[in-house]
Image (cartoon, grey):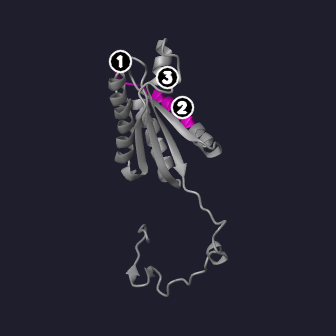
Amino acid sequence: MLVPLWYKILIMKRSFLIIFVLVLSLSTKAQHQISIYFNSNESALSQKSTALLDSFAVFIKSNPVNRIYINGYTDNTGTEEKNTVLSLKRAASVAQYFNSKGIVMTMIETKGFAAASPKGDNSTEQGKALNRRAEISLQFMQLKTANMPETVKKPVEEKAPETPGTFGNAELEVGSTLI
């Protein structure tokens, strides 16, 4: 089925609005968390989820994120053992997607909690849908200077290299990273 261009633009505008609100809320809240929802008995990401994760990955890469916590959950359908495995798969699915977007796995911690901590009522289909999720929380790096000596707190002015484009013996190119 062909989708008209105006419809695609409308969907894109809505997505950007959602992302804008998400980023705005992330920058004002102490707890930075989003939820990704899954179909029953599945750990595959939907197209809607990947679009949200794409934007979140950009946000993560452009901010001083220290750690990413991904917790998987299920509804109460099935055995505890099956739900534990499924919740771990959901968290791993999100982690692998972030990794495919250039976020290193060493920053990511995944856990599966099965049907624990339900967001919705497991006696209704709407409630169960809210419980089939992965929650992503971010921990940001904090620069602490309270106990540092005064010499460390104040930035040290460095001399510019005598030859532009060099630093010591290393030649620098536009876009290169100096560590």
Q: Is residue 165 visible?
A: yes
Magenta: main secondary structure: helix
Label number found at residue 78: 1
Q: Residue at x 46, y 18 (%)?
A: 128
Residue 139 appears at what percent x and percent y?
Answer: 53, 49
Find the residue positioned furthest to the front: 80
Indicate which disc, 1 or 3, sits on the residue closer to the N terminus: 1
Image quarter in which the N terminus is found: top left
Quickly name the residue at label 2.
14
Mark 1 element type: loop
Q: Is residue 43 visible?
A: no
Residue 32 appears at what percent x and percent y?
Answer: 56, 42
Which of discs 1 and 3 lies nearer the camera? The answer is: 1
Q: Residue at x 42, y 68 (%)?
A: 177
Q: Residue at x 58, y 57 (%)?
A: 142
Magenta region includes residue 73: no
Query: Disc 1 to disc 3, how far (Cα)?
Result: 16 Å
Indicate which disc, 2 or 3, sits on the residue closer to the N terminus: 2
Quarter of the image for residue 76 reads: top left
Q: Using a 10 Å C-alpha cutoff, classify the residue at mark 2 as few (fewer than 14 neighbours), some (14 to 19) or many (20 or more).
A: few
Image quarter in which the C terminus is found: bottom left
Image position of 76 (left or right of 10): left
Q: Using a 10 Å C-alpha cutoff, classify the residue at mark 3 as few (fewer than 14 neighbours), some (14 to 19) or many (20 or more).
A: many
Query: Disc 1 to disc 2, how far (Cα)?
Result: 36 Å
The range drawn in magenta is: 1-19
